[in-house]
Amino acid sequence: MIKATINNVKIEVPEGTSILWAAKKANVNIPTLCFHPDLKPGGQCGVCVVEIEGIPGLKRACMTPIGEGFRVYTHTQKVMSARKEIVEMILANHDSDCLTCIKNNNCELQTLAATLGIKIVEYAKLEEKLPIDHSSISIVRDPNKCILCGRCIQVCSDVQSVNALAVNHRGADTVIGTAFSAGLGNSVCINCGQCVVHCPVGALYENSSVEAVWEALHDPDKFVVVQEAPAVRAMLGEEFGMPPGSLVTGKMYAALRRLGFDAVMDTNFSADLTIIEEGTELVSRLKSGKNLPLITSCSPGWIKFMETFFHDMIPHMSTAKSPQQMFGALAKTYYAQVKNIDPAKIVSVSVMPCTAKKFECQRPEMKASGYQDVDYVLTTREIGRMIREAGIDLKEMPEELADDIMGEYTGAGTIFGATGGVMEAAIRSAYFLVTGRELENLDIKPVRGLKGIKEAEIDIDGTKVKVAVAHSGAQARELLEKVQNQMATDGKCEYQFIEVMACPGGCVGGGGQSWGSNMAKRARRGEALYAEDKSMAHRRSHENRSVQAVYEKFLEKPNSKKAHELLHTHYMKRSLVDGKVINE
Ligand code: SF4
Ligand code: SF4
Ligand code: SF4
């Protein structure tokens, strides 16, 4: 342990602790713009400078370990004027049009400039405007707002193992960009949005569908249906000042109805349906022994990652569409038929914690209904903005239920939103599909939580099924490389079933979540989903009566020809050639 003082307050912290973390022991938050609690410190911004008695110059608190006997001062005159100067220099290079900026009121730079009392920027303002990158279906990049903090590069390379972004050029010309400046939409980017939720300013944001959805809601000739992903109910409250992990399912339905949606249903319904389709696929592959391990397919960021970096694993992928797309395919077929609505008049909207879902809904193969199955995807942030724009306070909403037909769900559908949840839900139903008996202990705890790659072994009537769960691109890469090595050596691998989610923590950590993401928030949102699961009368997907009704009235049986036409898909190989992604 190291003993030192910060602003004359005695502290004791483990050796190697940075001054930035040590200061928290003295109840001091040293300001910073590039530091993020889930990422390695890089010292890019220089805002966190402090003075250490007896050591010349100023030191960056994020990069300097506290030493024995250090006397650290965080707001001397020298520190304060240096800090102000750094922020002024950032502002001189910054398009500070806060009122029209996506991050207005949620921006770390705006907050810091206000905290430091910066009224005038003494430096000459950079007038040159760089082009905004609109090439991606999911994400917009505005280099004029970028403060070169490096968080996006680090999360994209270290956490996601995608490496779509890098520092281009040098000196005053430095910009963050993609290879050959081709734009995110022409890069290896998997649309996960982790760069978006880690960016401290308004330089990265989702490609918004808010205006298009308002237009549909205002059109009397349209019938607008909405579905909400499992994770959204555990994070939408944050948009209205509620603590992370507040479960707002009933209030969310009520707010959506008041926005004017004609039918408020739930993606959890189609999560249950996904489990029946994918669970049936798992049982059939376990019987045949072919194409094991089966790998889950509901995370569109993961699908693009697999198509780009691991396309030789395509035969192992479940062909089941994601719950979003299953819902979309049924909304314009089954739902339209039951409700006697012309499918051409249906506008299908989804509310997702995810930016990659915007890409997924526009994939050419997602037109099984004869129309684009899901027309618009709104992130949790976008629906939060719409609800606020309509003057609705989510906190004051009554608890309502979703509509029938495609609104009922079980606890298994809810836990889809957390890492390990798809696996747990699938096992609950696969056990029943194989044995005809119900699995008694429904809580498969080894696959829960935010630790790295998780494993479990389940005994299904004497058949041992070994499973693994990865959440983030880096974990997916590690797990898939292990699988490939085992298969190259032994012709088979130790796992029969693998769940991969592109985002850390699963969908509760998606790129469409409320601003200010960190692992602690993700953990609380996941706990909320498990709490809802625990509270439900039905916790197994095959117990969902509305899902049973779809099979009885429309799809005939799981994995039927019709189910395959509507609910299953195929994948493509993507390769990077001369800086451009080629789809095959
Ligand atoms: S990024 Fe922040 S400081 Fe810059 S314009 Fe947007 S809100 Fe204002
Ligand atoms: S969306 Fe994901 S893959 Fe694309 S640049 Fe951002 S972090 Fe990287
Ligand atoms: S885009 Fe955002 S996260 Fe990336 S370097 Fe710029 S300010 Fe930082």
Image: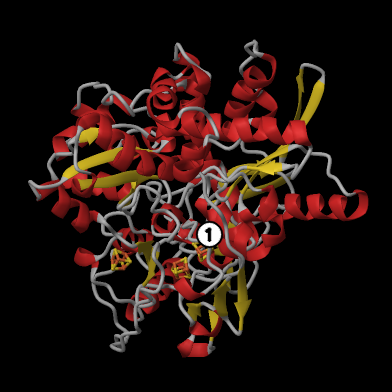
Residue in the picture at 53% in, 47% down? 299
Whether residue 268 is situated above or below residue 298 in the rendered picture: above
In the image, 77 versus 326, the foreground residue is: 326
Q: Position of residue 583 (x, y in %)?
A: 55, 71
Looking at mark 1, is its residue's CB closer than 8 Å to ligand 3?
A: no
Identity, as a three-letter code, of the amino acid under mark 1: Phe
Whether residue 234 is situated above or below residue 500 in the rendered picture: above
Left or right of residue 419: residue 451? right
Residue in the picture at 74% in, 42% down? 293
Give the class, few, some or many, for how many residues have Cα within 10 Å of label 1's Cα (few <14, many ≥20): many
Whether residue 435 is situated above or below residue 379 in the rendered picture: above
Q: Position of residue 464 (x, y in %)?
A: 81, 25
> Mark 1: which secondary structure?
loop
Quadrant of ligand 1: it is bottom left
Residue 267's image quarter? Answer: top left
Q: Name the image quarter holding the C terminus.
A: bottom right
In the image, 567 versus 4, the foreground residue is: 567
Q: Position of residue 148 (x, y in %)?
A: 47, 74
Q: What residue would you read off at disc 1?
A: 35
Q: Where is residue 271 in the image (x, y as percent from the top left)?
A: 47, 33
Left or right of residue 457: residue 183? left
Q: Name the image quarter holding the N terminus.
A: top right
| Outermost residue to the right | 489
Left or right of residue 198: residue 67? right
Is residue 41 visible in the rendered structure shown here? no
Residue 559's image quarter? Answer: top right
In the image, 186 versus 103, the foreground residue is: 186
Residue in the picture at 33% in, 34% down? 334
In the image, 240 versus 247, the foreground residue is: 247
